[in-house]
Amino acid sequence: MFNLTETAGPSREWPFFRHLVLVVLFAWIIMSFSFCSSSSKKVPPPVKDSIHIMLPPPATISPFELTNLKTACESWFDAVLDKGGFNGTVLIAKGGNIVFEKSKGMGHVGATDTITATTPFHIASVSKTITAMAVLKLWQDGKLNIDDELNKYFPTFNYPGVTIRSLLNHRSGLPNYLYFMEDMGWDTKQYIKNQNVLDYLVIFKDKLDVGAPDRRFNYCNTNYALLALLIEKISGTTFPQFIQKAFFTPLNMSHSFVFTHEDSAKINPSYDWRGQMIPLNYLDLVYGDKNIFTTAEDLLIWDRALRSNALFNEQTLAQAYTPYSNEKPGMRNYGLGWRMNIYPNGKKMIYHNGWWHGYNASFIRLIDEDATIIVMGNRYTRAVYKSKLLCPVFGAHYVTGDEEEGESVKADSTAATAAPAKSKKPSRRKGKRAR
């Protein structure tokens, strides 16, 4: 046995040597413990690149062009939105570069919660653009055929000839649930759900004013309430969950969500043009046709995603932007979830407006110029729909004509207080929607 006391050298060196051995031994024990402890933890898997990372980077824009665009946008904001009682956010971008962004007002009128770039707003019928693209994503992935009749997926739906495509392009001939649910006896003290809309169509078919499918364009919110049900049927999850998983989460649209009753406490209310709050009513839990809350910056991300191959291929986008309402001559038309102006030179303005209670929004996309105009707010003003006046800044061919109002509002007492130009309550049947 090796005896440390018999090693060469004076015995007084032993204490030092012993201490050295102990220090080395102690260090080895600590390192071994640390290694064992760290190796026992589960190493997280590497984070995969998100779709957001694959979006196209902003295009190059010269300082001269940037200055000119910013000046034009500021002039428009001051002359149109600011004087129109605007309460919300506006964002204008060129090539993915934000050339102008401004927020104005408070989330709660009269309070101190200043609206910022991260304040989400209800975008009303602009939600249809996201619902439509969700359906087209399922089609692109081989989960459905847009020329299938809806009764293939809902056998009780007794409306032969109504296809998924005819729901997307508003040519189904179905009546608008905003009106017929109440007419057929719905208790307006109870919230309507999407399934209720389907059930009432089936039960009361003989009493409803139903048109022949694919005969003409008739803008109708029922179409998109049914499409949300279809998405749930195909995906096996709720519409809010599907949209979150398919679009909002991978695109890092972190301030976007589909409104449900559980979100009531976290949203800003809407107001009429006078600044009077408009309460929720029995129509507020139907989604697909509306009920998406988002920010202007999140909507710009959505725009960038649509301009890339991250989510959709060229064939799918071509379907979305094809005009389907050609029976009436003119430049205005509708694709699959998108309104469009088609100009003699072949240019297209792809857009959608929205109006629900006091919320209104405009989302305009000039594909060839790679320009985006986004306006949203929670105090109703028609000035929002004058966003088209900015389009000629990006191309002289974008003659706008008369501004269109939004869609999806029910002309009840709320709508009667929404437009200062009208002092008389409008007909409930005519409603208020874009032409």
Image (cartoon, rainbow, N blue to C red):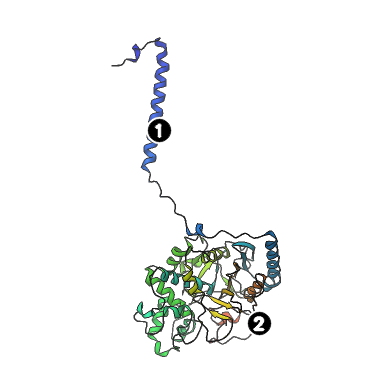
> Which amino acid type is marked by label 1?
Met
Residue 193 seen in render: no
Is 117 positioned to the left or the right of 29 in the image? right
Residue 62 lies, in percent from the top left, at 67, 60
In the picture of the structure, the residue carrying the numbered disc 1 is 31
Residue 204 lies, in percent from the top left, at 40, 87
Residue closer to the observer: 431 or 349: 349
Residue 324 lies, in percent from the top left, at 50, 81
The N terminus lies in quadrant: top left
Residue closer to the observer: 184 or 340: 340
Q: Mark number for residue 325?
A: none
Mark 2 vs mark 1, foreground winner is 1
Task: Check if mark 2's residue and mark 1's residue have beta carbons within 8 Å.
Answer: no
> Which amino acid type is marked by label 2?
Ala
The C terminus lies in quadrant: bottom right
Q: Secondary structure at mark 1?
A: helix
Q: Quadrant of residue 158?
A: bottom left
Residue closer to the observer: 142 or 256: 142
Residue 165 lies, in percent from the top left, at 44, 78
Q: Report the Cα–Cα distance between label 2 and label 1.
A: 79 Å
Q: Secondary structure at mark 2?
A: loop
In the displayed structure, would residue 364 be above or below residue 48? below
| Mark 2 vs 1, N-terminal side | 1
Q: Mark number for residue 421?
A: 2
Q: Residue at 39% across / 46% down in the picture?
A: 43
Looking at the rendered structure, the number of numbered marks drawn on it comes to 2
Residue reaching furthest top? 10
In the displayed structure, would residue 401 be above or below residue 65? below
Q: Residues within 10 Å of mark 1 (few under 14, many from 20)?
A: few
Residue 180 seen in render: yes
